[in-house]
Amino acid sequence: MDKALQMIQLQQQLNDATNGENWEEGVTKNGKRINWKRCIYMECAEMIDSFSWKHWKSIHDEPDWENLQIEVVDVWHFVISLALQEYAREFRGGAEELALYVSELAIYETLKQETVLASPEEIMEQVERIMCHVLTPNTFDLSELIESFLRLCYMSNLDAASLYRLYVGKNVLNQFRQDHGYQEGTYMKIWNDQEDNLVMKLIWEEHGVLKPQELYRELERHYNAL
């Protein structure tokens, strides 16, 4: 449960800092309406672009597996956020209760032991299932959404340890973005011809185990050198 709880707590902290307290009510501190379901299906659409799915363009391009995993983790941020909002609205508890639920799922336990790399078509179909979950409000089931997402992790060769590592990295990057003008539109997302997502991933791979504050400092060092 520890890693699941840490991810969920980090998301709660990021949402509190970015959107203000009581964001679970669906409005930010700036009066902007929050729609986590829309966030999920828009990120899922971006995820599909990791594959050369277009029959009229770049038909021989290889799948971008690294980008796929980064996009999966992006969706996880929004799935956690939606789940926290639903738990608050339904008086089911908070981060600890949600983490307990996730950690006891059979598919989450499987992620600790093994994963596979499914075909691009199978992965895209799974992504579209997730989109369907959030695009059908009358039949929305949070449990089915979470399980479908974890199944996507399994199919994308993203085990529990990698999910945690990339999630923490992206969470720190999101906080870094907010601290450097992301909401105001002054943040630079491309660092020397590389998207900041990829730079973050390369820093993890170069340094191995990093504490969140150490990763933040490395991001700052790279950003200040631009």
Image (cartoon, rainbow, N blue to C red):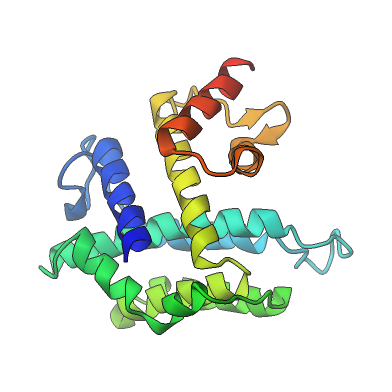
Residue 141 visible in the picture = no
* Quarter in which the N terminus is drawn: bottom left
Instruction: Name which quarter of the figure residue 53 lies in.
Output: bottom right
Describe residue 201's horizontal placement relative to residue 167 as left or right.
right
Residue occupying the point 32% across, 42% down = 14
Q: Position of residue 219 (x, y in %)?
A: 54, 28
Describe residue 89's horizontal placement relative to residue 107 as left or right.
left
The residue furthest right is 60
Closer-to-camera residue (194/181): 194
Residue occupying the point 41% across, 32% down = 213
Q: Position of residue 2 (x, y in %)?
A: 32, 60
Instruction: Name which quarter of the figure residue 94 lies in.
Output: bottom left
Residue occupying the point 41% across, 55% down = 77
Q: Determine whether 120 is above or below 7 in the image.
A: below
Q: Determine whether 184 is above or below 29 in the image.
A: above
Instruction: Name which quarter of the figure residue 8 lies in.
Output: bottom left
The residue furthest top is 225
Q: Position of residue 6 (x, y in %)?
A: 33, 54
Q: Determine whether 114 is above or below 197 in the image.
A: below
Q: Position of residue 226 (x, y in %)?
A: 64, 17
Residue occupying the point 59% across, 43% down = 208
Residue 20 visible in the picture = yes
Describe residue 6's horizontal placement relative to residue 54 as left or right.
left
Closer-to-camera residue (207/154): 207
Describe residue 71's horizontal placement relative to residue 140 as left or right.
right
